[in-house]
């Protein structure tokens, strides 16, 4: 039999029979999953079109998924940052609304052979770094992948949620200038994801456009306070005229406050201080620190939402969405 019973909707079983394949193969071909050859995929798609097959595309239940599980990968050295923990909660909450389980995929739980594929329906990667072999393996798994921020490697993710960090960094630097700063320094992150690289490029461009000397140093992401304080100490020794410091990494601005005080500087008066990532440490510091609210929980939720929509067929592959972010002005930049 090559067609559904007249008057009843075609099922996946009808499509499989018409294409002479198993139901699993038909399902994989229709969703773009698994290792299905080109001719087989075309045969399944042709059969589905002939029969008028319409899958149930409810984004809430995703009954077309195989495992009803998605995986989330965050590099282990980042998991101590408040941003990433909020991101995880956002992913988990949105996945639960869609009836999906979430598994946290660490490097140690990946298949040993690069040809093996994680047993999940799709992946969410947070701020992926191109030279990370784990990220490269996941990007090449053949599974749908949604990334938080753009991926700067060769492969293209299935979907992207990103924020305009060039615009937010420009706004932050302009705010410092309007508040009287003329020699802002930048403590950059040494990671090579799109977020960190964008901030570095924006700072360099902003300085060049205003004929301001660049005063930048890099610190390893997740550095302890002593390392960050040493970076600031060296910056101030190199250029005592620094009147503002912008810290890229989560929590770094609050960590350098003691060093600024030890140098005889008063934050919010003779030196301004700002962060590219807002957090509870920025809000409770003394003085409270101006920061960019990256909305990590919402970012996680939107990544999971987009992955669900792509898996269910509601949203096309290659979709890119912008998540608005905003600067929170506090006493550290109000001279």
Image (cartoon, rainbow, N blue to C red):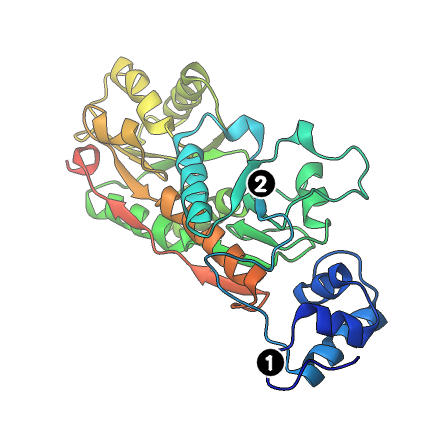
Q: Position of residue 125 (x, y in %)?
A: 56, 44
- Above or below: residue 185 compared with residue 285: below
Assign the N terminus to one quadrant of the image: bottom right
- Compare marks 1 and 2 and give the one earlier in the sequence: 1
Mark 2 falls on what kind of element? loop
- Residue density around tag 2, few if under 14, some if 14–19, many if 20 or more, within 10 Å: some
Rendered image quadrant of residue 323: bottom left
Say which residue appears at 20% left-offset and 30% top-offset.
288
Q: Is residue 193 left or right of residue 180?
A: right
Q: Quadrant of the C terminus?
A: top left
Q: Which quarter of the picture shows residue 49?
A: bottom right
**Which numbered dot is residue 8?**
1
Q: Any mark on residue 192, and which?
A: 2
Q: Nearer the viewer, mark 1 or mark 2?
A: 1
Residue at the spot 31% in from the left edge and 25% down from the top edge: 254
Give the secondary structure at mark 1: loop
Q: In the displayed structure, would residue 117 be above or below residue 224?
A: below
Q: Nearer the viewer, residue 73 or 172?
A: 73
On the picture, is 271 further left or further right than 116? left
Q: Which quadrant would residue 154 be assigned to in this image?
A: bottom right
Residue toward you, 233 or 34: 34
- Mark 1, Cα crowd under 10 Å, few <14 / some 14-19 / many 20+, is few
Q: Position of residue 289 (x, y in %)?
A: 24, 32
**Residue 240 to residue 316: above or below:** above
Q: Nearer the viewer, residue 245 or 63?
A: 63
């Amino acid at each position: 039999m090559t067609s559904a019973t007249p008057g009843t909707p075609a099922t996946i079983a009808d499509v499989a029979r018409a294409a002479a394949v198993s139901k699993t193969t038909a399902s994989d071909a229709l969703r773009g999953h698994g290792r299905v050859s080109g001719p087989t995929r075309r045969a399944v798609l042709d059969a589905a079109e002939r029969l008028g097959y319409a899958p149930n595309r409810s984004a809430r239940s995703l009954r077309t998924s195989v495992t009803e599980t998605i995986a989330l990968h965050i590099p282990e050295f980042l998991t101590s940052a408040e941003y990433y923990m909020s991101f995880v909660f956002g992913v988990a909450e949105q996945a639960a609304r869609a009836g999906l389980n979430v598994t946290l995929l660490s490097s140690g739980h990946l298949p040993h052979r690069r040809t093996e594929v994680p047993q999940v329906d799709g992946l969410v990667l947070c701020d992926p770094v191109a030279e990370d072999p784990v990220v490269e393996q996941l990007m090449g798994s053949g599974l749908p992948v949604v990334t938080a921020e753009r991926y700067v490697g060769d492969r293209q993710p299935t979907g992207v949620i990103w924020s305009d960090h060039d615009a937010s960094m420009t706004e932050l630097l302009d705010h410092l200038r309007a508040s009287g700063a003329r020699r802002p320094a930048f403590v950059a992150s040494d990671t090579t994801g799109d977020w960190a690289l964008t901030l570095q490029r924006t700072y360099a461009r902003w300085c060049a456009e205003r004929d301001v000397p660049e005063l930048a140093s890099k610190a390893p992401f997740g550095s302890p306070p002593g390392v960050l304080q040493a970076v600031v100490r060296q910056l101030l020794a190199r250029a005592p005229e620094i009147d503002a410091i912008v810290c890229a990494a989560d929590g770094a601005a609050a960590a350098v406050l003691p060093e600024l005080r030890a140098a005889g500087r008063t934050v919010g008066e003779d030196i301004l201080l700002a962060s590219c990532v807002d957090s509870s440490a920025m809000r409770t510091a003394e003085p409270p620190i101006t920061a960019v609210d990256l909305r990590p929980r919402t970012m996680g939720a939107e990544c999971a939402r987009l992955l669900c929509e792509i898996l269910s067929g509601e949203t096309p592959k290659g979709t890119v969405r912008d998540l608005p972010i905003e600067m929170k002005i506090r006493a550290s930049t109000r001279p």
